Image (tube, helix red, strand yellow):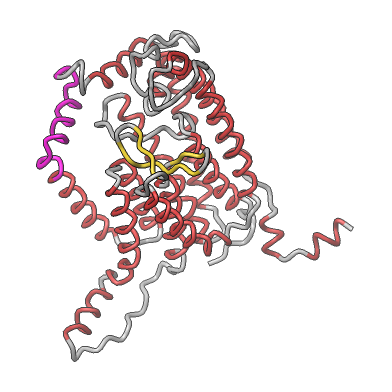
Amino acid sequence: MARKAKRDLTIEQQLARGPIDLPFLALVMLLTAIGLIMVLSASYASAMYNLDPAIDTGGDPLYFFKRQFGFALLGVFAMFVISKIDYQHFRWMSVFVLGASIVLMLMVFVPGIGKSGGGALRWVKIGPVRFQPSEIAKVGIIMFFAAGLSKRTGQPAPPKKWSKRTFTGRMAARLDRVGLLELIPYGVVLAVVLGVIALQHHMSAMVLVVVAAASVLFASGISLGWFAAGGALVGGALVWIITQTDYMKARIEIWQDPFLEPRDGGFQPIQSMTAIGSGGLLGKGLGNSSQKHLFLPEEHNDYIFSIACEELGMVGACVIMALFALLIIRGFWLALHARDRFGTLLVVGITSLTAFQTFFNIGVVTNFLPPTGISLPFFSYGGTALAIQLAEMGMVLSVSRQIAAPKAE
């Protein structure tokens, strides 16, 4: 009976039931487990002291860990459920995911639903759940761009017939010839998403959305000339913002020399480097960090890697970075071997987002980069962020199920 039922399945259904990529799954689970251990170690002091008026931990030293562990279970469950879905369904779902993320980001400004934290209005609270809608926007952009750009064949499209008798027709023909018309719909969507995020003054989310979109565009074969033009435009805008904003200029100066304001803006990077340096080669031992006792701000969030360096030493930090590197390499390997272009672009976008987020976070905590507010995947405290990251990994695993199948265009 089981064999007959299997024969009754369509080819697509049989492909979607293929084996998931075990090396990728093992790396995800290992990083999640280590991240939970580090949240437990880094957060118990601040949870016990309960000095943040916005969060009532009740003096429970396991407060943050228990919440993170609960969302980790939810994320792992979502990952396995999503991994069993034929990833071709993500094509039509992309519009709804992106649209929902924009609506949720606008709900941030609705009184009673939008919540502030750390001086910023970036959260939505629906019942007991509090999350940043920009996390959903990142994966929504990847899905939308991958679904649309997967239709490109990689060969130059035949030029459309535009009327050469009118100025509009001649201009449209030129824009079509250089490939700009193809990019306009994606540029409009990206501008809308970035505009909503800009209203929240969430610079780190804007950076990651741009990275996610650019990675999919690059993998789809868009001309490098457009990347050079876009990079010059973004770089020029960034320089203008920094030079015209006293706040940004001050942050850059403090990044270059944190000891200019050791008790104010430079306090966090100084404490972070102190934690990293005091770990030495082998670390102080798990749970023995000194900096997490209210010296280092955001010790269980954006700066959790500093605590990992202090407790596990350079050896432990290198092991963590090696695991991230293996996960990223394996992700790109899966992208190269995906059954079709949509699978390739989807995995490239998710893997690139994870790679850049990891690089930015570690760069900030080591003071290699100026502060960005970007968290470390699988490690930083944030339940909904962790659940969404694991759901993204489920998408990658869904693509991996069909790798053994003949490639489709």
Kindly indicate the quadrant of the structure image that contains residue 166: bottom left
- Camera-side residue: 403 or 251? 251
> Is 254 in the magenta?
yes
Q: In x, y percent, where is residue 72?
A: 57, 34
Q: Which residues are magenta?
A: 241-260
Q: Residue at x 19, y 52 (%)?
A: 232
Above or below: residue 220 compared with residue 320? below
Kindly indicate the quadrant of the structure image that contains residue 314: top left
Q: In x, y percent, where is residue 54?
A: 39, 27
- Camera-side residue: 13 or 97? 97
Q: Residue at x 30, y 67 (%)?
A: 184
Please state if 12 lies on the left or on the right of 173 as rendered: right
> Is 71 in the magenta?
no
Q: In x, y percent, where is residue 345?
A: 46, 56
Name the outermost residue toward the right: 1
Q: In x, y percent, where is residue 163?
A: 24, 89
Kindly indicate the quadrant of the structure image that contains residue 239: top left
Please state if 9 lies on the left or on the right of 260 as rendered: right
Number of callouts: 0
- Camera-side residue: 321 or 77? 77
- Camera-side residue: 198 or 316? 198
